[in-house]
Amino acid sequence: MTTVGTADSAHEGTGRGGALEVPEELGRGRLRSRILTLAAIVAIVIAIVTLAPGLGSLRARLAHLQPSWLALGAALKLLSGLSYVLVFRAVFCRRMSWRVSTEIGLSELGANAVFPTGGAGGLALGAWVLRRGGMSGQHIAKRTVAFFLLTSVPNVVGVIVLGVALALGAFPTHPELVLALVPAVAGIAAIAGALLAGRAAAAGRLRFARRASGARGRSTKVLGAIAEGVDEAVMLLRRHDRQLILGAIGYLAFDVMILWATFRAVGASPALEVIWFAYLIGELGGLLPLPGGIGGVDAGLIGTLVLYGAALAPTTAAVLAYRAIALWVPAVAGGIAFITLRRTLNREAHQIAMCEPGEEVDVIGIGPVVIGATAGGHRTT
């Protein structure tokens, strides 16, 4: 038998379809609480928009939304979700079937709709599914870090490119110089910070490894996942993988264009560069731990768009329509995907397990080969 590299750590937990408890943050009690809270917040928002004085212009905009543009927005959300699936498959396993990849990816997006927090809810669900299929925690952890970084790259690069372009007068829109350059500088700092975090985590892991026990042992694993995840992200980017690049760009671009479509639906049309730039900055509100991101994302988007020159009433109407699409489309699609995924896992868990380094596969002309991490500087694919 030919061995390429060294196998990662053995599978943890039961794996390969065995019993594995759903993580606490995705348990039925927590899910029920989140859904009820989300429903209450939606009801409050509807009541305020419907009954509060001084919102006549907003109500008029919402009452005359054009259904065709909203339908386009829903279609764009589905395309964004399929782009997310492309990135998931490129990062975690190309040998996984498209059906399994799509079900996991859409289920993650559905979880993100209810448990936003920067995508942590979806990542927790994805990690549970992969462990349920038999993939080791170590491999999942480092690839999850890489996945988070890779799906964030287009946002950060977009802020840098658009900020510099606006500062140089490349677009008809001319915001104040500080409004264009500060986000661009923050984006550059974010990239540098991610790379430095990887190096710092690697150094910290070495220190803790010398005396790993108890809490230090757990810290070593966390730091190792961060260090290896950053390295994995850089390695995957250097491959110039078309599926990964197109998926990451599509995941962002289609979502931004939903906001463009909802502006059209309310009869307003800010400059496209303003929509893009404000979206990239305003979506940071989604990092707040609010059900469905309601409040944080909305305030961030509305405030940023108005700051860059959009009118308040149509902007509020467009953002509320955008949030409705961004919430319900992935929630419904993700719910359906999760129902089918649980059935699929009972039959096809081996497709996840075979993605784990250390699995044996047959290669024509070579024979059985163990998929390993590294050996003499070479990595299997």
Image: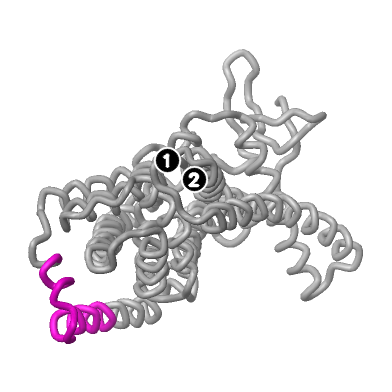
How far is the residue under mark 1 from the one under mark 2?
6 Å
Residue 106 seen by the camera: yes
Judged left or right of residue 24, residue 213 is right
Residue 222: in magenta span: no
30 left or right, relative to 235: left
Furthest-right residue in view? 210
Question: Residue 251, position in %: x, y?
Answer: 40, 45
| Residue 168 place in picture, x, y as percent | 54, 41
**Camera-nearest residue between 135 and 329:** 329
Circle 2: element type: helix
Image-quadrant location for residue 313: bottom left
- Tell whether 272 sits left or right of 178: left
Q: Based on the displayed image, in which of its 4 quarters is residue 208 positioned?
A: bottom right
Residue 53's place in the image compared with 259, above or below, is below
Give the residue at mark 1: 171
The circle drawn on residue 166 is 2
Q: Pinpoint residue 363: horizontal percent, then vertical percent.
A: 59, 21
Q: Earlier in the sequence, mark 1 or mark 2?
A: 2
Pointer 1 with pointer 2, Cβ within 8 A:
yes
- What amino acid is labelled 1 in the image? Phe
Taking 119 as reference, is 235 left or right?
Answer: right
Q: Give the prevailing secondary structure in the magenta stretch.
A: helix
Considering depth in this image, is 101 or 73 the residue closer to the camera?
Answer: 73
- What residue is rendered at 49% in x and 68% in y? 287
Element marked by disc 1? loop
Q: Which of 185 and 308 lies nearest the eye of the viewer? A: 308
**Quadrant of the image for the C terminus?**
top right
What residue is shown at x 24% (from left), y 59% (from top)? Answer: 325
Instruction: State which region is magenta.
Output: 39-61
The disc labelled 2 sits on which kind of residue?
Leu
